[in-house]
Image: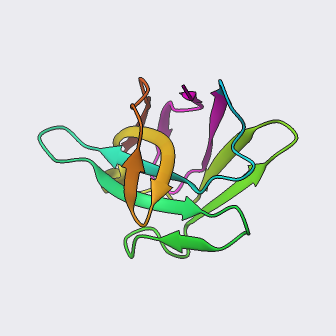
Amino acid sequence: QVQQVESGGRLVQVGGSLRLSCAASGRTFTNDAVGWWRQAPGKEREFVAANSWNGNVDYADSVKGRFTISRDNDKNTVYLQMNNLKPEDTAVYYCNRVLGRNGLGSWGQGTQVTVSS
């Protein structure tokens, strides 16, 4: 069973940048599409970005031009570079294998991103 561990979240000011990491164990991400989601307090989890095994990427409209998803197959890790952060980006961020914009398998603990104005 694939387990993923998210890290890199912290408190950051408006306009700042963060890079989140998603490390997998149990199997490699190499042949998987992997994505990021986020859940803000009182809201449902929403899709953020996805990266397929062949390099195709998909972004939610709310993060296009600000966030970049990438992967390092040698490290079995997927990243989410977040620039020009806004207060509405505050959420717990999760990674998972993805089909379309839906997560597959179990969810990890996530990593908290807080954008302060």
Q: Is residue 115 visible?
A: yes
Q: Residue at x 65, y 24 (%)?
A: 26
Q: As drawn, which residue projects farthest toward the left?
A: 42
Indicate how the structure is coloured in the image: rainbow
Give above or below for 87 relative to 41. below
Image coordinates for residue 7, horizontal then vertical, percent: 58, 28
Q: Is residue 22 left or right of residue 11?
A: right
Residue that appears at 81% across and 47% down: 72
Residue ID at (50%, 30%)? 10
Q: Position of residue 82 (x, y in %)?
A: 57, 55
The correct choice, above or below, for 39 with respect to 111 in the image is below
Residue extending farthest to the right is 74
Q: Which residues are magenta?
A: 1-24
Q: Nearer the viewer, residue 90 or 99?
A: 99
91 vs 32: above or below: above
- Residue 2 within the magenta-colored segment of the rendering: yes
Tell me if 63 is positioned left or right of 34 in this view: left
User: What residue is at 59 percent from the left and 57 percent from the top?
Assistant: 33
Q: Please state which of residues 30 and 71 is positioned toward the viewer in this rendering.
A: 30
Magenta stretch: dominant secondary structure: strand
Q: Position of residue 43 (x, y in %)?
A: 15, 46
Residue 111 x %, y %: 46, 30
Q: Quadrant of residue 69?
A: bottom right
The N terminus - image quarter: top right
Task: Indicate whether 30 appears above or below 10.
Answer: below
Q: Give the total number of marks visible in the rendering.
A: 0
Q: Quadrant of residue 6?
A: top right
State whether residue 117 appears in this view. no
Magenta stretch holds residue 69? no
